[in-house]
Amino acid sequence: MYGVIPSNLLWAAILLMMQQGGMVGAVRGLLLFLLAYTAWIVFAVWRAAPNAKDPRYGVLARALTVVWAINTVLLVFFLELQLLR
């Protein structure tokens, strides 16, 4: 839950701010914070994964978290391109 709920709240805030316009600096700050938060979550899940009772769940947690991080990086990249316009 550390990753899902806070990141969705951050995405909602970013979306709202982008729709309102005029807050480019704040949006960029939230995007940067989101990238740092995502990195923290990836490292936390990566370190905790070996503690899973079933090793398959640890591998699954790592894989899903890495895919989620790649998705976040791509979304931030394309949103930043949108902000440059």
Image: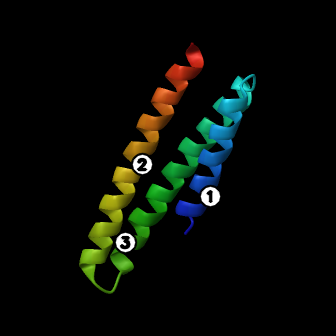
Tell me which numbered mark, 3 or 2, is placed earlier along the sequence.
Answer: 3
Seen at 39% across and 63% down, the residue is 46
Q: Is residue 83 left or right of residue 25?
A: left
Split into 4 quadrants, where in the image is the C terminus? top right
Query: Are the residues flagged by discs 1 and 2 in contact, CB closer than 8 Å?
Result: no
Q: Which of pointers 3 and 2 indicates the residue nearer the eye? A: 2
Give the color scheme: rainbow, by chain, secondary structure or one colour: rainbow
Frontmost residue, 77 versus 19: 19
Tell me which numbered mark, 1 or 2, is placed earlier along the sequence.
Answer: 1
Frontmost residue, 31 versus 19: 19
Seen at 30% across and 60% down, the residue is 63
Q: Is residue 42 left or right of residue 62?
A: right
Would you name the residue on which mark 3 appears? 49
Task: Indicate the amino acid at tag 3.
Answer: Ala
The span from disc 1 to disc 2 (Cα, nearest Å) is: 14 Å
Q: Quadrant of residue 28?
A: top right
Frontmost residue, 49 versus 5: 5
Would you name the residue on which mark 2 appears? 69
Q: Secondary structure at mark 3?
A: helix
Q: Secondary structure at mark 1?
A: helix
Q: Which mark is residue 6?
A: 1
Q: Secondary structure at mark 2?
A: helix
Task: Indicate the amino acid at tag 1.
Answer: Pro
Split into 4 quadrants, where in the image is the N terminus? bottom right
Numbered-mark total: 3
Q: Quadrant of residue 26?
A: top right
